[in-house]
C-alpha cells in the first residue's frame, strides 16, 4: 500500500509539471490560481477541518499578505523578504484574532471572523494613501531567483508549484506532529482533551495563527500573479469561496482543500462549453455532492471504496457460539 501511494504521488507530481506545457496564457493563469487558492484552503482546513474552529476571514489574511507584498516589492524589496514579512504578519494577526475563539464557538465565532473580514475591507478601501483605495495597487514585479525570471506565465506557474509543494510538505509535517494530533483532539472532544492535559487555549490560538499564515503566503503569491490588487479581491465573498473549497473537498482530510480548489476554480472553466448554463450546472453539481456526501469528495470516495472493498466474513459455524 505504501509503494502504491508513492506511485500515485509521483504520477500526480508529473501531471502537475506537465499540465501547463503547450497551454495558453489563460489556462496557465487558471492553474496558478488553483495552486495559490489550494494553499489558502490548506490553512482554513487546519483551522476548520482539524481544529474545529469556524473562520470566515481567510480572504482577509490573503489581503494582508497581498498588500504587504505589493507595497514592499514596489519599494524594491525582493519577494522572498516581502513574503516572509507577509506570513509573519498574518500569523501575528491570526494569533490576535484567535483570542475570541477562546470565548465563543461555532456560528458565534463565524460572526467574529466575518466582522474582521469586513473591517479589513473597509480599511483597505478607505486608507487611500497607503493602499490606493478603490483604485488598488498595480505593477507589482514578479520575482527573480538566481537569474531565473518568472515574468512569463509558464515561469510563474513553476514558481507557484514550488511554493505549493513547500506549503503542502509543511502542512503534512504539522498534521503528523504532536500539534496535529492535538488539533484533532481539540476538534473531537475539547473537554476530554483538556482532561488529558492538552492546553486548549494554546492549541486554539495556534490553529488560527498557522492557518492565517498559509493565507498570507497565498496572498503574497497573488500580488505578483495578478499584478493588480484592490479591496474587492479580498471581500467576504472570497472567504466564502475558500470555505466552499474546504467543504467540497472534504474538511479534515489532507487532500481535501486541493480537490475542493480544483472544483471551485477549474470546474467552471471546464463547463464553459455549455455557455450560459455552466454556472447552473456547476451549482447543481455542488448541491448534489453536499446532499449525498456532506464529507465532500474524499468522503464520497471513502464510501465508494468501502462499498466495493472485500469484507471480512465471519465463520457461520461460530455465529451461535460453541454448543457443547
Image: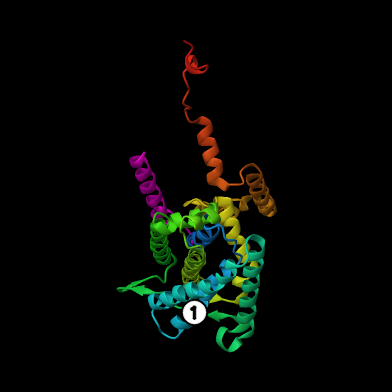
221 or 154, nearer to the observer? 221
Residue 253 shows in this picture: yes
Q: Residue at x 57, y 83 (%)?
A: 131
Q: Is residue 175 left or right of residue 56?
A: left
Q: Residue at x 47, y 77 (%)?
A: 69
Residue 304 on the magenta span: no
- Counting from the top left corner in percent of width and height, residue 293 is at 61, 43
Q: Residue at x 63, y 65 (%)?
A: 104
* Image quarter hosting the N terminus: top left
57 or 150, nearer to the observer? 57
In the figure, residue 238 lies in which quadrant?
bottom right
- Counting from the top left corner in percent of width and height, residue 77 is at 40, 82
Residue 134 shows in this picture: no
Q: Main secondary structure of the magenta part?
A: helix
217 or 13, nearer to the observer? 217
In the figure, residue 105 lies in which quadrant?
bottom right
In the figure, residue 157 lies in which quadrant?
bottom left
Q: Residue furthest top?
A: 324
Q: Residue furthest bottom?
A: 129
Which secondary structure, mark 1? Answer: helix
Q: Is residue 146 left or right of residue 166?
A: left
Q: Which residue is mark 1?
A: 68
Count the marks. Answer: 1
Question: In the rendered image of this protein, does residue 219 appear above or below residue 68?
Answer: above
167 or 69, nearer to the observer? 167
Q: Is residue 107 left or right of residue 187?
A: right
Label 1 Cα neighbours within 10 Å, binned few <14 / some 14-19 / many ≥20: many
Give, as a single range, the part of the protein colored magenta: 1-26
Q: Residue furthest left?
A: 146
- Counting from the top left corner in percent of width and height, residue 172 is at 40, 56
- Counting from the top left corner in percent of width and height, residue 187 is at 54, 55
Residue 6 on the magenta span: yes
Amino acid at each position: 500500500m505504501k509503494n502504491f501511494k508513492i506511485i500515485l504521488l509521483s504520477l500526480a507530481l508529473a501531471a502537475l509539471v506537465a499540465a501547463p506545457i503547450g497551454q495558453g496564457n489563460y489556462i496557465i493563469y487558471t492553474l496558478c490560481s488553483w495552486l495559490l487558492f489550494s494553499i489558502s484552503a490548506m490553512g482554513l482546513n487546519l483551522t476548520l477541518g482539524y481544529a474545529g474552529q469556524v473562520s470566515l476571514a481567510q480572504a482577509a489574511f490573503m489581503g494582508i499578505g497581498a498588500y504587504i507584498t505589493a507595497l514592499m516589492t514596489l519599494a524594491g524589496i525582493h519577494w522572498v523578504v516581502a513574503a516572509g514579512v507577509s506570513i509573519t504578519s498574518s500569523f501575528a494577526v491570526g494569533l490576535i484574532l484567535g483570542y475570541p475563539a477562546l470565548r465563543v464557538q461555532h456560528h458565534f465565532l463565524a460572526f467574529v471572523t466575518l466582522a474582521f473580514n469586513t473591517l479589513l475591507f473597509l480599511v483597505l478601501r478607505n486608507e487611500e494613501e497607503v493602499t490606493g483605495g478603490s483604485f488598488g495597487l498595480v505593477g507589482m514585479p514578479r520575482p527573480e531567483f538566481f537569474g531565473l525570471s518568472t515574468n512569463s506565465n509558464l515561469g510563474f506557474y513553476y514558481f507557484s508549484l514550488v511554493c505549493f509543494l513547500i506549503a503542502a510538505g509543511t502542512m503534512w509535517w504539522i498534521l503528523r506532529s504532536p500539534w496535529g494530533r492535538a488539533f484533532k483532539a481539540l476538534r473531537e472532544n475539547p473537554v476530554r482533551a483538556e482532561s488529558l492535559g492538552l492546553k486548549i487555549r494554546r492549541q486554539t490560538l495556534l490553529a488560527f495563527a498557522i492557518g492565517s499564515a498559509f493565507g498570507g503566503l497565498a496572498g503574497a503569491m497573488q500580488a505578483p500573479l495578478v499584478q493588480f490588487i484592490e479591496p474587492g479581491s479580498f471581500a467576504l465573498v472570497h472567504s466564502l469561496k475558500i470555505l466552499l473549497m474546504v467543504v467540497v473537498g472534504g474538511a479534515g482530510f489532507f487532500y481535501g482543500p486541493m480537490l475542493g480548489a480544483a472544483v471551485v476554480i477549474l470546474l467552471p472553466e471546464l463547463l464553459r462549453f455549455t455557455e450560459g448554463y455552466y454556472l447552473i450546472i456547476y451549482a447543481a453539481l455542488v448541491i448534489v455532492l453536499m446532499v449525498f456526501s456532506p464529507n465532500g469528495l474524499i468522503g464520497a470516495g471513502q464510501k465508494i471504496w468501502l462499498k466495493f472493498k472485500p469484507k471480512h466474513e465471519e465463520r457461520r459455524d461460530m455465529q451461535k457460539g460453541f454448543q457443547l
